[in-house]
């Protein structure tokens, strides 16, 4: 028997198996994510020609520009602020649903889970148009408020609409993330708290909430990232009057054809995501 | 923990269940249960899996509400009192420690919920940890403890609030045999020292017999017998109790009007013989003796020695289990087990030889045969 045949039959080591298994996704990521991002980084250091096109010179002017221009600074602050607000609203609305789902059993649970996931089966465009129909000035919501004799708010084509629409659209993601993080919540532990004299409210604050913090952190990270990068809903429901990072990147890239500026803003979004991820892991470290 | 020197002498009823019942949907798990536990005593709920021990305990703790009946503690009706106002310490089978808190915080939790001043909380929690010998682990998280240590934390957490009643749901079933023995002694000592009324759920008869003042033997949601360990063991109220508590031999026979019982064609007597007709007789294996068959005895017609029973059978096999030898003897179509302490000089009878079993007539329990 030859030495070559001998080595060929040697079983793969665990490390080698891992490399082999990770190779496809690593390649896809390199081609589909790393390269484009590097490309974006390069564009952000080039100069835009008036009316489109890129001048291949090295310059920091895009970066200095957006930090000097109050308009872009406001967009960044606004985007982060609105996304945080939407994340918190999504969390508050989703938490009770997730908790109820976590505690239900059998067919009822399956049914409710399908109900929670079903919005994801519809495109965000369709759901956004649904919200436009509901929230527009002659829609049922405003109509009801008006018939109660209250001053009718403007819910459409401003930040209100974007807020409401995005919150609803992100809720399924939040619920699923919360459920994934509720693993440590054992009903026996809640019962232990009750028998030790904790009222339902105190049980919630002292036991349930701390034990579900990992799920909350995960859900918030996910929803924040999705909110910052969401484009369709702000575009359609903002009516061109709401300026957020995603819509501005679109405008710069497609309307103004200023690719270097669009690239700069995109890299900025990546930096914000990096910060969110850092905050998330910091929270997780604190929890353990 | 305080001492209540009078707790034992005051035999006041403390925890009382009155026709307590629980149904889950159409399933009647507990039909009707009535029971009075005295102040300062430790009562075991003993029964096979699924007989409703946990369900009853959870009703007492207020974690599920009874379908029927009443629960009172010291005369006060607590049937509809929410769990957190009941003042009971519950030790779960799975311990149910708070995974996000240190051992000390776990123990302190109940005191904090009672709004005890902060310095006192810490002092009392530390003292409770000392009692279960875990002070050195106060700052650990529960997941960094062994099963036995977690169990002791759970015990300290339940005891530190000085509850009016301590409820334990199979607290030892996840521990190994040696630790279980130690914890048995420790739990009993703590319970007696604090004079607390305790209910101890178990399906382990040794635990029930060795730790508790009285035992409730449960079967399918009702009480088969409620009595002291000796009563339960020596005077079981039913074949179920007799075979569930301790090892027992069961034989079928027929009792006549004079109280003579015919078993496998041979005649024996019992101390009391109220039953007539088909009966079930029971004897404890260690109360019986084994001897090589006496050839001069004519088995079917022999008149029994006064107060002494005798049955002839064939030794089928014997099992050596350290300090005991178990002899399995075929009598008619039944098998009888005899246990004897091992002796070094023992000339053990060989399998296949005829043997005589002897035991006191007073050690014979007779029950009317079940319909089946
Ligand atoms: N929530 C419930 N819904 C329906 N049936 C239940 C419920 N809880 C318990 N049961 C049933 O009630 C019966 C008694 O259960 P329980 O847990 O009290 O038994 P147990 O005596 O504690 O048994 P074990 O020794 O196995 O712990 C079982 O048949 C069980 O299936
Ligand atoms: Mg149980």
Image (cartoon, coloured by chain):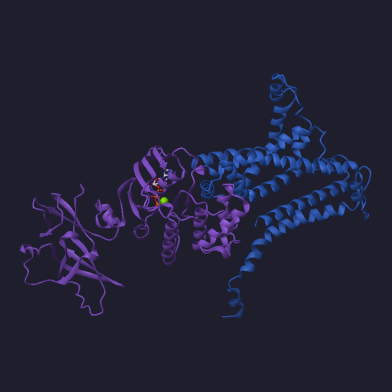
**Image point (52%, 44%), residue name:** B84
A170 with respect to A245 (left or right): left
- Residue B156 visible in the snapshot: yes
B125 with respect to B229 (left or right): right
For residue B66, which quarter of the picture?
top left
Quick check: A44 above or below A124? below
**Image point (79%, 51%), residue name:** A270
Tell me residue A169's x, y (percent).
68, 38
**Image point (38%, 59%), residue name:** B211
In the image shown, does B92 or A122 lie closer to the viewer? B92
The shade of chain A is: blue
Tell me residue B155's x, y (percent).
49, 56
A114 with respect to B56 (left or right): right
**Image point (77%, 27%), residue name:** A154
B177 with respect to A68 (left or right): left
Q: Quadrant of the N terminus of chain A?
A: bottom right
- Residue B99 visible in the snapshot: no
Q: Which chain is purple?
A: B
In the image shown, does A135 or A3 lie closer to the viewer? A135
Quick check: B243 above or below A259? below
């Amino acid at each position: 028997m030859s030495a070559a045949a001998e080595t060929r039959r040697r079983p793969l080591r665990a490390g080698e198996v891992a490399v082999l298994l990770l190779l496809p996704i690593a390649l896809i990521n390199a081609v589909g994510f790393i390269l484009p991002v590097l490309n974006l980084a390069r564009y952000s250091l080039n100069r835009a020609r008036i009316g489109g096109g890129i001048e291949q010179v090295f310059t920091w002017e895009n970066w200095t520009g957006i930090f000097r221009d109050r308009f872009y600074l406001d967009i960044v602050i606004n985007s982060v602020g609105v996304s945080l607000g939407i994340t918190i609203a999504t969390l508050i609305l989703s938490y009770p649903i997730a908790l109820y789902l976590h505690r239900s059993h059998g067919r009822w649970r399956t049914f409710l889970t399908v109900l929670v996931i079903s919005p994801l089966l519809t495109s965000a465009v369709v759901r956004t148009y649904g919200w436009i129909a509901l929230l527009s000035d002659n829609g049922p919501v405003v109509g009801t408020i008006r018939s109660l004799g209250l001053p009718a708010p403007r819910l459409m084509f401003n930040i209100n609409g974007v807020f409401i629409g995005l919150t609803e659209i992100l809720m399924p993601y939040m619920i699923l993330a919360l459920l994934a993080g509720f693993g440590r919540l054992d009903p026996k532990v809640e019962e232990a708290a009750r028998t030790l004299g904790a009222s339902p409210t105190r049980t919630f604050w002292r036991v349930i909430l701390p034990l579900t913090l990992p799920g909350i952190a995960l859900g918030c990270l996910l929803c924040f990232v999705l909110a910052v990068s969401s484009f369709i809903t702000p575009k359609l429901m903002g009516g061109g009057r709401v300026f957020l990072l995603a819509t501005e990147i679109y405008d710069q890239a497609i309307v103004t054809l200023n690719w270097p500026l669009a690239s700069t803003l995109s890299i900025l979004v990546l930096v914000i995501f990096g910060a969110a991820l850092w905050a998330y892991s910091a929270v997780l470290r604190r929890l353990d | 923990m305080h001492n209540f020197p009078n707790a034992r002498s005051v035999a006041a009823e403390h925890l009382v269940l009155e026709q307590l019942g629980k149904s889950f949907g159409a399933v009647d798990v507990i039909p009707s249960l009535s029971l009075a536990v005295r102040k300062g005593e430790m009562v075991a709920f003993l029964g096979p899996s699924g007989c409703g021990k946990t369900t009853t305990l959870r009703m007492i703790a207020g974690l599920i509400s009874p379908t029927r009946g009443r629960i009172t503690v010291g005369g006060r009706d607590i049937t509809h009192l929410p769990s957190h106002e009941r003042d009971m310490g519950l030790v779960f089978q799975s311990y149910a420690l708070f995974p996000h808190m240190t051992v000390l915080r776990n123990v302190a939790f109940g005191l904090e919920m009672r709004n005890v001043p902060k310095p006192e909380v810490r002092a009392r929690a530390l003292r409770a940890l000392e009692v279960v010998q875990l002070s050195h682990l106060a700052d650990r998280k529960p997941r960094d403890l062994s099963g036995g240590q977690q169990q002791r934390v759970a015990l300290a957490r339940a005891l530190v609030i000085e509850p009016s009643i301590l409820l334990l749901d199979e607290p030892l079933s996840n521990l190994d045999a040696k630790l279980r023995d130690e914890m048995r002694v420790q739990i009993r000592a703590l319970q007696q020292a604090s004079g607390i009324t305790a209910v101890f759920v178990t399906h382990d008869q040794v635990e029930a017999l060795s730790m508790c003042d009285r035992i409730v033997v449960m079967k399918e949601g009702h009480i088969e017998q409620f009595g002291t360990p000796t009563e339960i063991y020596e005077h079981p109220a039913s074949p179920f109790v007799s075979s569930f508590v301790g090892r027992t031999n069961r034989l079928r026979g027929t009792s006549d009007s004079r109280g003579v019982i015919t078993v496998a064609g041979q005649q024996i007597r019992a101390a009391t013989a109220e039953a007539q007709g088909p009966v079930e007789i029971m004897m404890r294996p260690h109360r019986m003796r084994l001897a090589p068959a006496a050839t001069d005895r004519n088995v079917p017609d022999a008149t029994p020695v006064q107060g002494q029973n005798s049955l002839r059978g064939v030794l089928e096999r014997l099992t050596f289990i350290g300090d005991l030898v178990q002899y399995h003897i075929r009598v008619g179509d039944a098998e009888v087990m005899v246990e004897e302490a091992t002796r070094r000089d023992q000339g053990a009878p060989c399998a296949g030889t005829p043997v005589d079993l002897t035991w006191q007539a007073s050690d014979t329990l007779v029950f009317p045969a079940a319909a089946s």
